Amino acid sequence: MTKPSSDQAEARPTKRFFVSMLTRDINLADAILDLLDNCLDGALRLAQGADVNYSQHFVKIEIATSHFKIEDNCGGIPREVAKNYAFKMGREPDDDRDNEAATIGMYGVGMKRAIFKMGREALVRTSFENDMFEVPIDSAWLEAKDWSPLPINEPTEPDEKLAEPGTTIKVSKLYEGVARQFGNAAFENELRSAISEHFTMFLQKGLKVSLNGAPVYPVLVAVLLSDRKDGPAPYVFQKSIDDVLVSITVGLNSGRSLGDDDDDDPGFERDRSSATAGWTVLCNDRAVIVGDKSRLTGWGDSVPLYHPQFAIITGIVSFRSNLADKLPVTTTKRALDTSSNVWLEALVKMKEGLRVWINYTNQWKNHPRGDQSQFWEGARAVPLMDAVAAISERVGVKASLVQLEFNPQKAKVLPLPPSKTPSSRRIVFSRPIEEIRIVSKLLFDAEDTKPGLVGERCFEMTLTRAEEQEGRG
């Protein structure tokens, strides 16, 4: 039996603890990518359910030892949203702005966490439908114990006006470690690479992103596809699982061909696509991971561990949903929630697709690349959704409406190597490069022929001569 009293136990988090813990589990580059995510979410809201023309949007990022700045023209923040939602430390249950848009924001902490990660003062200036205002966050508010509301001010000077609807965030009074990183060229390169990988889909669709005045270009994550109906094609699977549309494709990338041997040409610079070998995972078009070659994406679990032989295999899996909390992604948006049901179901099909191409590389690994090049002639590198659309036309179904599954091995559209006899063996030997050049000049009238081709021609000539002598005998 208890008796109620007028006393109450305080349960609100302290501001210092909240801010400290909020920024501890995210690195600096990821915090900046969070702000870029917000820009893209703004463009989606602006489109109001229609396809976004990303070529009309830009995001400009500046990093310096004195400040951080990000500027976009992605629609801005409505005043009512700023008053009731945007600056709260967390998302309210009644915030249903994104129920009809495939955004990636879930918890309502991205902008605040990025600002608190970088510095002690910030100014958020925004323009939405000719309504312009700014919200300052200063060190006094940050250090105060209470959660008092932030002021909303009206810019009055001409140079404070934004040219078009969008948002500008400037962070100053940077923390010492952040300022040091912003002044480091290596960090700038790291951030540029992260943007080119994680936002490759948007960059390919025309979004213009610049970092310190220089444009950021996308990393192509693609698989080879023949336009011929009977030509080689990637493995494709698509199905809706728990309100999430899962699309998977596995195939060859446009890197080095099968049969190429690093020892044959030590000066060969590997195609950038080989860096995206392995698995790239997209959540609402954001690349959560790029080129993963670990057990995380199935390597070594009922399929072999990753090996350089598989550097020509690229897998892409996309998760799309208007319910962002159902996506298999963590709060940082750069790591997977591998315990989610949608991820575990997708992983089964991911490994099935891997087996198709692992078997393919095993069949061809001891054959010259020329034996298979004719089958891939004219094949083009395509992103995931182009591959899904092309395969859906081949099998006569409309993608995203019904389950789509295409196994090129079962469809018998993959080239098979010439039959091998049980007695066939691979011949491998080394000779000084000067001697190889001399023989190459004699046989091909060029000194830079691939050593493998030089050795192959030498063997063929010797075999022909031996057969002729045997015939005369």
Image (spheres, grey):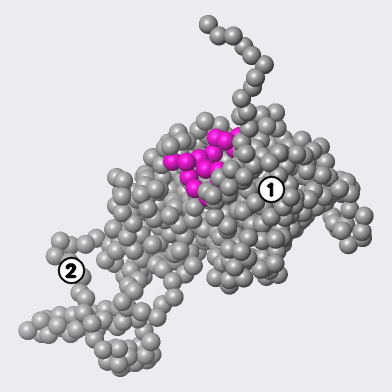
User: Callout 2: helix, strand or loop?
Assistant: loop
Res 12 → quadrant? top right
Q: Picture coordinates of residue 414 (x, y %)?
A: 38, 54
Res 346 → quadrant? top left
61 is within the stretch colored magenta: no
- Residue 128 disc label: none
- Residue 425 disc label: 2
Circle 1 sits on which residue?
A: 143
Q: Is residue 205 visible?
A: no
Q: Picture coordinates of residue 206 (x, y %)?
A: 68, 58
Q: Looking at the picture, which amino acid does disc 2 mark?
A: Arg
Res 347 → quadrant? top left
> Magenta part mainly helix, strand or loop?
loop
Which residue sits furthest top? 1
Q: What residue appears at the point 41 percent right and 68 percent down from the top-left corner?
A: 256
What is the C-alpha distance between the residues marked 1 and 2? 74 Å
Q: Residues within 10 Å of mark 1 (few under 14, many from 20)?
A: few
Q: What residue appears at the point 19 percent right and 84 percent down from the top-left corner?
A: 462
327 is within the stretch colored magenta: yes
User: Callout 1: helix, strand or loop?
Assistant: helix
Task: Look at the image and give the residue range highlighted in magenta.
Answer: 323-338
